[in-house]
Amino acid sequence: MSRRSPRPAQDVTSAAAQPSDRRRALPSVDEVVRALAAEGHEEYTHVQAVRAAREALAEARHALKQPDSLDAGGAADAGAIISRARELLAEQRRPTLRPVINATGVIISTNLGRAPLAAAAIETMAAVAAGYSNLEYELRLGERGSRQAPVRNLLCALTGAEDALAVNNNAAAVMLVLAALASGKEVIVSRGELVEIGGGFRIPDVLRQSGARLIEVGTTNRTRLRDFEQALTDETAALLAVHPSNFRIVGFTEAPPLAGLAALAHDHGLPLIHDVGSGCLLATERWGLAHEPTPQESIAAGADVVCFSGDKLLGGPQAGLIAGRAALLEQIARHPLMRAVRSDKLTLAALEATLRLYRDEVAEREIPVWRMIAMPQQHIRQRAERWVAHLASAELAASAVADFSTIGGGSLPGETLPTTVCAIELPGTAADLAAERLRLGSPPVVARVSRGRLLLDPRTVHPDADDALLHALEEAIRG
Ligand SMILES: *Cc1c(COP(=O)(O)O)cnc(C)c1O
């Protein structure tokens, strides 16, 4: 990543010196380090300064080697090298993993870290992180306790399950459940649900890794209860239903209802396992969205073990949650893989705080994912118009345009929420260039580009970030 701004071309006649002369004229590493130290106020070690000086000099030498780089004269200038070294030091001090402003209007994006946490979750997590905690210590008895207890109690109350536990993510949850309940035996799944979630996470592969044997039934578009029934053998350990969360088959389709699958499983003394995906605990219809299956519905329909993510529509930290019948959960908790995938104290702290917001019925107001989904359209439009007016005052042309936000994160495919974006029309490839500059800025801003226009959706931008966003935008467009 080169953060140098383009330098004005030098007058060719006056830059008559040969590249070799100019290379000789470069400052030494020591000179650059001394110049940096003379500034006095920077916080870096001598070793870091030497490394930055070497890198800046190497870049300048490289620029001089370019046959007709008019830029080289400027880049090889001692002042430019010192300022480049200063930039490299500043970059080093910035964490590589850092906050970005999401102006894409995609609420849950795995690339951008999925769900932002609620304030209560951040506070609880910070308090637990800063010192010791009663993670596995029963304060009333002065004895060892269970790290799962707080999350278990909340999940049971919210989903109606008898027992529950948390692991690192939903992929781990599915793997652990299958390993504990079906290793060496058969698991029956519909062909229409053998999905790839993304990042190469495929249900058939996870099944194989767990040691269970996959028995596919039905067809891509239609699977009936009878298909499951005919595949049952003495080797069957469980029926598995997977919510195909990130795609939708439309048209001539059929899938057995969950309650029917549960009844079939129970008639044969088997458990029904349901990977419900996003961990959506609220009714999405309230915001004009299609119905997203919830863990509580799944439990009510008779599923014996339900798995879901903590950082999709649940709006909490990365986690995989397993809820269901006590006897099965006990078997799962005892499996050796459990130790390998157990959640840490920071996750458990954030998860408990997030689940409490559902219990207290303030999720819609307090959990960012739901706040963004529930954001009134006129609020979004007013913000987009404010952005447009701000840009106009800086003599940059933009307009507030009706558009759509999406849920993302493999939830509610094809579902959109009406929004208003700030659209900036730029000539040629200037929109792509501006989007790149926004990404490389500080803080980085991720925007959308569509048909030569730069689009910024206020829905996914925290209101506190408006000023930073507008400042970044001005810089990026002006170049
Ligand atoms: C997202 C998803 C997963 C994977 O969950 P992670 O928490 O990302 O590990 C598994 N199954 C379904 C149906 C999903 O939607």
Image (cartoon, helix red, strand yellow):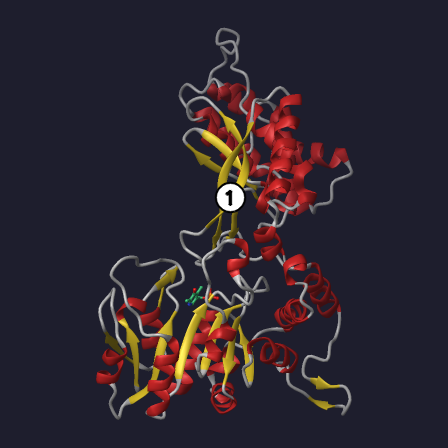
Q: Residue 469: give x, y in percent of width and height.
A: 63, 37
The one of 77 and 232 positioned closer to us in this rendering: 232
Asked where in the image residue 478 lies, by quadrant, the reply is: top right
Left/right of residue 245 with respect to residue 153 in the rendered view: left
Q: 269 above or below 370?
A: below
The one of 86 and 78 positioned closer to us in this rendering: 86
Asked where in the image residue 222 lies, by quadrant, the reply is: bottom left
**Residue at the spot of label 1:** 418
Q: 83 above or below 237?
A: above
Q: Quadrant of ligand 1?
A: bottom left
Q: Residue 127: give x, y in percent of width and height.
A: 75, 67
Q: Residues within 10 Å of mark 1 (few under 14, many from 20)?
A: some
Q: Amino acid at mark 1?
A: Pro
> Measuring 36% from the left and 85% from the top, which residue is drawn there?
263
Q: 319 above or below 225?
A: above
Asked where in the image residue 192 lies, by quadrant, the reply is: bottom left
Left/right of residue 132 with respect to residue 403 in the rendered view: right
User: Could one spot residue 101 in this view of the protein?
Assistant: no
Quadrant of the image containing the C terminus: top right
> Measuring 58% from the left and 56% from the top, which residue is drawn there?
369
User: Could one spot residue 259 in this view of the protein?
Assistant: yes
Left/right of residue 340 with respect to residue 474 in the rendered view: left
> Measuring 49% from the left and 25% from the top, which residue is drawn there?
425
The one of 223 and 153 positioned closer to us in this rendering: 223
Q: Residue 138: give x, y in percent of width and height.
A: 72, 87
The one of 66 and 343 positioned closer to us in this rendering: 343
